[in-house]
């Protein structure tokens, strides 16, 4: 019997789809086809690559309504928000396409009678490993720039969102991409390890958990392959004494609970100047109570289930441990009728009287819970924000741009926001520090990890 994988919807445990896993023999064929196809693709003009990638994005956008429902059924995001993912994909994808010609051009450093330049050459075959939480947004970060740089791409998507991999394949096929340049594969953990070890794979771009990143590095040990790792975080926010509280509350509630908190750069801990602490907490809690937890296919639902009951139970465990250690829960879960232990439906929670000895303030929650602490001054806020093994993004809420910039310089993080959070700007480098990963995606710097420099030194005959 064929080895298969099923997508189980968090909505009602129904089977969304079932697919046959790609066999080891088939993987070898896929890799060989990609290696051959890349030899011609790398020579194609950037304008030709751009035309095809734009067409692929157009194709995905044309199916926006169908894709939105598929996203909801596969991972539980409320249908009212699901279409936004393709708008984000378009923003990132088109930006990277539009800057490609300039950023991939030769770097000319000729001198006198010596022609000298550095050429950015493609790596070869890039394996993109994408997660389920933002199945299109995370994947496009690697796929489009890798293709534009002249690489072939294999996409291994999460088994929770395999339909997204098929949509990518369909879009690139319909856009006229040469056969073999982009291929999606259905593999489990063992199959992923086989791909990483395959000598035809030149680079691995992985988005996922720290545990997953460790396995990736262990698998690739001694193979001298490039690897980009985006591993999530425990992203903090600091509300200063001069902050606009109304704006801070509204934006941070959304930053903490959008996608049921299942965002790598979602807000998971908040530090508020003691002058505004109680007012902030009161307003924050009241706004959280306005969420509608329920079936994400219903138009009125604003908070859907988590991806599965195991993920929800893990967050329930963090909340329970924190309360046992002295934290106070500000939300009565009975306000949310859909909340049921043992299911993916979990009421949003706000915790106060928390401290950094609690897992909920140290370990990634990846769920609809946030802890809020008062601080006396900027220095204490920076100390607490940096007291984490993660460092993806951090946000500062203030009317003082210069002060926010100065504080940002002290933060151990890849991105510093002021009066904003939970957003990825394609014009900026997407990087993580500490256990949030390594590598740089998007921006003008994003092409560096997907190409290798090749130097030319051409001296005229005497």
Image (tube, rainbow, N blue to C red):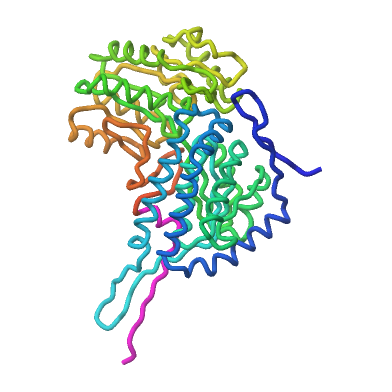
**In the rendered view, would you say 277 is above or below 297?**
above
Measuring from the top left, give residue 224's x and y in whole percent. 54, 58
Q: Is residue 456 magenta?
A: yes
State the residue in front, 359 or 423: 423
Q: Residue at x 69, y 38 (%)?
A: 18
215 to the left or right of 2:
left
Q: Quadrant of residue 431?
A: top left
Q: Residue at x 54, y 14 (%)?
A: 339
Q: Quadrant of the C terminus?
A: bottom left
Q: Residue at x 37, y 59 (%)?
A: 100
State the residue in front, 242 or 168: 168
> Given the current orientation, which residue lies at the most extreme right position?
1
**In the rendered view, would you say 139 is above or below 146?**
above
Measuring from the top left, give residue 300's x and y in whole percent. 46, 20
Q: Is residue 154 magenta?
A: no
Q: Residue at x 48, y 14 (%)?
A: 322
How many marks the image carries: the answer is 0
Measuring from the top left, give residue 173's x and y in whole percent. 56, 56
Magenta residues span 445-462
Measuring from the top left, give residue 301's x and y in whole percent. 48, 21
**In the rendered view, would you say 74 is above or below 257?**
below
């Amino acid at each position: 019997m064929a080895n298969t994988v099923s997508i189980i919807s968090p909505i009602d445990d129904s089977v969304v789809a079932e697919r046959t896993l790609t066999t080891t023999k088939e993987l070898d064929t896929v890799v060989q086809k990609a290696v051959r196809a890349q030899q011609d693709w790398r020579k194609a003009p950037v304008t030709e690559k751009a035309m095809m990638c734009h067409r692929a994005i157009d194709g995905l956008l044309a199916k926006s309504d169908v894709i939105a429902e598929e996203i909801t059924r596969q991972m539980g995001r409320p249908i009212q928000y699901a279409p936004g993912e393709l708008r984000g994909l378009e923003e990132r994808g088109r930006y990277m396409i539009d800057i490609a010609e300039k950023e991939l051009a030769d770097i000319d450093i000729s001198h006198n009678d010596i022609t000298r330049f550095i050429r950015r050459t493609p790596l070869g075959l890039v394996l993109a490993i994408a997660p389920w939480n933002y199945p299109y947004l995370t994947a496009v970060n690697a796929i489009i720039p890798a293709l534009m740089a002249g690489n072939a791409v294999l996409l291994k998507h999460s088994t929770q969102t395999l339909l997204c991999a098929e949509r990518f394949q369909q879009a690139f096929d319909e856009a006229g991409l040469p056969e073999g340049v982009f291929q999606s594969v259905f593999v489990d953990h063992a199959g992923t390890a086989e791909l990483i070890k395959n000598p035809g794979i030149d680079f691995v771009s992985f988005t996922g958990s720290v545990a997953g990143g460790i396995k990736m590095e262990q698998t690739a040990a001694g193979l001298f392959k490039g690897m980009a790792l985006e591993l999530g975080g425990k992203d903090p926010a600091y509300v200063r004494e001069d902050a606009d509280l109304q704006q801070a509350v509204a934006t941070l509630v959304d930053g903490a609970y959008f996608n049921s908190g299942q965002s790598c750069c979602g807000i998971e801990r908040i530090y508020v100047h003691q002058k505004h602490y109680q007012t902030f907490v009161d307003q924050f809690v009241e706004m959280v109570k306005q969420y509608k937890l329920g079936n994400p296919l219903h138009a009125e639902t604003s908070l859907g289930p988590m991806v599965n009951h195991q993920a929800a139970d893990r967050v329930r465990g963090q909340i329970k441990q924190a309360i046992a250690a002295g934290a106070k829960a500000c939300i009565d879960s009975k306000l949310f009728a859909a909340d049921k232990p043992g299911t993916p439906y979990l009421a949003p929670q706000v915790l106060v009287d928390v401290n950094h000895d609690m897992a909920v303030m140290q370990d990634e929650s990846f769920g609809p819970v946030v802890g809020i602490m008062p601080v006396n001054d900027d220095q204490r806020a920076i100390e607490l924000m940096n007291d984490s093994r993660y460092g993806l993004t951090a946000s500062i809420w203030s009317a003082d741009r210069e002060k926010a910039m100065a504080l940002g310089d002290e933060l151990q993080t890849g991105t510093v926001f002021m009066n904003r959070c939970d957003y990825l700007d394609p014009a900026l480098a997407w990087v993580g520090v500490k256990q949030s990963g390594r590598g740089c995606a998007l921006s003008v710097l994003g092409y560096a990890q997907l190409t290798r420099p090749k130097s030319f030194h051409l001296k005229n005959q005497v």
